[in-house]
Image (tube, rainbow, N blue to C red):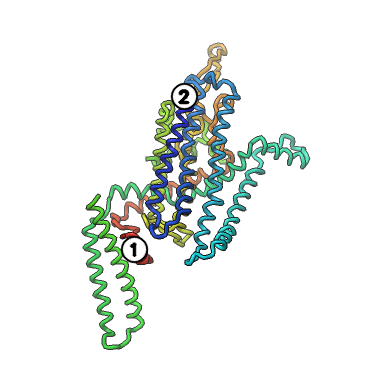
Amino acid sequence: FFFFLTEELLAARSEVILAFCWVYIRKYQSRQESEVISTITAICALAIALITSALLPVDIFLVSFMKYPNGTYKEWAANNETRQQIENTVLYGYYTLYSIILLCVFLWIPFVYFYYEEKDEDNSNKCLQVKNALKYTIGFVIVCSALLLIGTFVPLESPPNRNSTQWEKVQYLFEELGSSHGLAALSFSISSLTLIGMLAVITYTAYGMSVLPLNLIKGTRSILYERLENTEDTEEVEHQIDKLKAKCADGRPLSMRDRRNLQDLEAKLQVLRRQGRHLEVAERNCCNKVGSALRPMKVLDKALHSAGISTGFIIFGTNLTNPLNELLLALQPVFPLDYVLITIITMYFVFTSMAGIRNMGIWFFWIRLYKIRPQRTRPQALLFLCMILLLIVLHTSYMIYSLAPQYVMYGSQKYLLQVRYPSQGNHTAAITKICDADAPEDQCTVTRSYLFLHKFWFFSTIYYFGNWAFLVVFLIGLVVSCCKGKKSVIEGEVDADDSDFSDDEYVH
C-alpha cells in the first residue's frame, strides 16, 4: 500500500510540476518573439529538474520504511536481495532522470539555442540553420563525453595487488566499471553540473534570498507619486530640448556640444515616456486587482567536527543540534509530511533564485546578455533562464543535504549496537542508535541520492567552501538591500536600450 501511495504521489506531483512550469514559462516569455520549440524545451527542462528533486523524499522514505523503530529489519526487508531490488529500482529512476538532464544540458537546449541564434530575418534557409546549430552543439557533446570518460576511469580505489601488471590494472578498471553499472561515470558528470549549479546558487540564490524578503517588507513606492515625478521630469526635459532647438531657429547650426546634449536629452525623453506608459499600466492594474538561517550552523558544524578535507568534510555522529534535521526526522514516519516540507524548501530556492536572476539579469562576466522580464523575455533568454534554474535545482539536493545530512543519508533508520559493560562483568547489551556516517554498512542503507552526489570526495570539499562563499554573498546582498530604498513599481521593466517595439509589446 505504501509503495502504491508513493507512486501515486510522485505521479501527482509530476502533473503539478508540469502545470507550474507551463504557467511559469508562459508568464515570462515574449509575446512577440515566442517560439513553440523554445517554449516546450524550457518547460520540459525545468520540469525534469523538479521531478528529479521530487525523487529524493521517495528515496529517503523507502530506506526508512525497511526498518522498525527498534532498529531491526522488517520481515519483507530481512532478505538482502529484496532490499537490493528496491534500491536498484530507485537507482534506475535516478539513471533515467539524470541521463535526461545530461541530454537537455549538452544536446537539446544548446541545439535549440543556437538554432534561434542562426535564424535570419527572412527565415529562408532552414537547412543551413540546422547545420550551424549542430556544428556548435557538437562542442557540448564532446564536453559531455569527456566528463563521462573521466568519471569512468578515475580510480576511486587502488588495485588490490600493487605489483600487478599494466594489463591487470586495465582489466581491474573495466571490472569496476561493470560492477558499478556506470554509476561513477554518471555521478561525475552530474556532480560537475552540480558544481556549476553551485556557482549559480552563490551568484543568484544568495542575492535573491536577501533581496526577496526585504522587498516584500519594504514594498514599493507610491504609483501616484511616481507618475507625478515622471510628468515633472518629462516636462523639464522637453523644456531643455526646446531651448536647444531655439538656438538654431534662425538657421544657424548647433555646436558639437549642443548637438551631443540634444541627442542625450532626446534619448532620456524616450525613456521617460516609456516609464510613463508603464506607470499608467501599473496604476490601471493596481486599481483592477526560512532555510538560509540554518546554513551557517551546518557550515560551522562541518568546520569544527567533520573528518577533514580528504573525506569531503563528512560529519560522524551528531555534534550540533539541527532543528531542520530533527523536524524532517520527526515528520518522515508520517509520509508525506516530510515530502511537503522538502517541496516547500525546493520551491523557496527556485523563487529566491528567480528573484536574483530577475534583479541582476543574465551576465557573462561584465557583459549583460539578457534581461528577464514578464511577457518580454526572448526565446534565447528563456533557454538561458531554464538552464540556470535546472542547474540550481540540481544543486538543491546537496543544499538539502548540507541542511539535514542525517535525514538525506539514512532517513529515520536506526540500528542495534552491541555495547560491553566492564563494570558489570563484561556484560553485553544491544542499544538502539540513529544511523549516521559511522554506522555499519550492513545495518544502515544509504540513499541512492547520497551515492550519486558523494561518489567523489573532492566535489564535497568544493561544496563545503562554496557554502562559505554563499554566506558571504548573502551578507553582502543583505547589506545592499537594506541600504537601498523602496523599489519602483516598474523597476527592471524599462531600460535605456529598450526599443519602442518591446515597449508596445508590454503595454498592449
Q: Is residue 184 left or right of residue 213?
A: right
Say which of 130 and 354 sits in front. Answer: 130
The span from disc 1 to disc 2 (Cα, nearest Å) is: 55 Å
In the depicted structure, whether residue 281 falls above or below residue 247:
above
Q: Is residue 74 left or right of residue 501?
A: right
The residue most toward the bottom is 251
Kind of residue sitting beneath label 2: Phe
Secondary structure at badge 1 equals: helix
Say which of 334 and 125 sits in front. Answer: 125
Kind of residue sitting beneath label 1: Asp
- Residue drawn at x 46%, y 44% is 47
- Residue drawn at x 32%, y 80% is 258
Asked whether residue 419 is in view, the answer is: yes
| Residue 437: image location, x then y, percent | 54, 31
Q: Residues within 10 Å of mark 2 (few under 14, many from 20)?
A: few
Secondary structure at badge 2 equals: loop
Answer with the quarter of the image where residue 459 lies.
Answer: top right
In the depicted structure, whether residue 175 falls above or below residue 363:
above
Q: Which residue is mark 2?
A: 1
Q: Name the image quarter holding the C terminus.
A: bottom left
Q: Which residue is mark 1?
A: 503
Asked whether residue 327 is in view, the answer is: no
| Residue 389: image location, x then y, percent | 45, 48
> Do the residues under discs 1 and 2 have CB atoms within 8 angstroms?
no
Q: Is residue 71 left or right of residue 164?
A: left
| Residue 8: image location, x then y, percent | 45, 32
In the depicted structure, whether residue 467 falls above or below residue 60:
below
- Residue drawn at x 60%, y 25% is 81
| Residue 50: image location, x then y, percent | 46, 42
